[in-house]
Image (cartoon, helix red, strand yellow):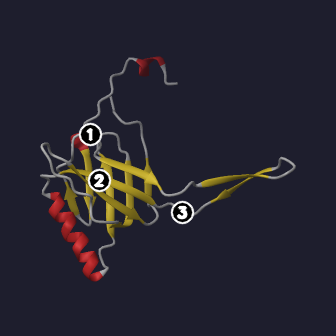
Amino acid sequence: MGSPSDINTVKTYDAKKVVVNYGGAPIKGFDDGDIVEIKATADRWTKKVGADGEVARVRHADETSEVTINLSQTSPANLTLTLFMEADRLTGKSILPLTILDTVSGTLFFWPQAWIKKVPDIGRGKDLKATKWIFDTGNALSEFITGDGMP
């Protein structure tokens, strides 16, 4: 629990201040709703309890993630990501850095190695649809999470 002065402090979050960059290319034109979703691929620790109740934990080295970037179907970044995906299909050489930074709060995720996992599912209809780009990553270099929204 914060100090009494923190209780009355209004925090601010601005989705426009979230910066996504893949392979040096800024990614913009996000869908309404979640900009990005980050899921750790594995637990960092596993608990083991012996028959006599002794507890131990096992550290796992897997610091990889699955990252979903949600773009509007009208986003020009769809073409950028398509070109990276095609280059990877043809050459196998589009394992590139992926950065997600909230410039207001300082929350930062950085993977030196990331790649597009598959062709996004595409839907077309009466309304605009999200284009969900799913990335797999190597081990994270930064997973720095702050309290989103700064006074």
- Cα separation, mark 2 vs mark 3, equals 21 Å
The residue positioned farthest toward the bottom in the image shown: 91
Residue 49 falls left or right of residue 21? right
Q: Earlier in the sequence, mark 1 or mark 2?
A: 1
Q: Are the residues flagged by discs 2 and 3 in contact, CB closer than 8 Å?
A: no
Of the two numbered discs 2 and 3 in the rendering, the one whose residue sits closer to the viewer: 2
* Snapshot quadrant of residue 138: bottom left
**Type of residue at label 1?**
Gly
Q: Which residue is identified by label 3?
A: 62
Q: Residue at x 23, y 70 (%)?
A: 84
**10 Å crowding of disc 3: few (<14), some (14-19), many (20+):** some
Q: Which residue is identified by label 2?
A: 69
Q: Are the residues flagged by discs 1 and 2 in contact, CB closer than 8 Å?
A: no
Of the two numbered discs 3 and 1 in the rendering, the one whose residue sits closer to the viewer: 1
Q: Position of residue 54 (x, y in %)?
A: 82, 49
Q: Earlier in the sequence, mark 2 or mark 3?
A: 3
Q: Which residue is identified by label 1?
A: 33
Q: Position of residue 82 (x, y in %)?
A: 20, 67
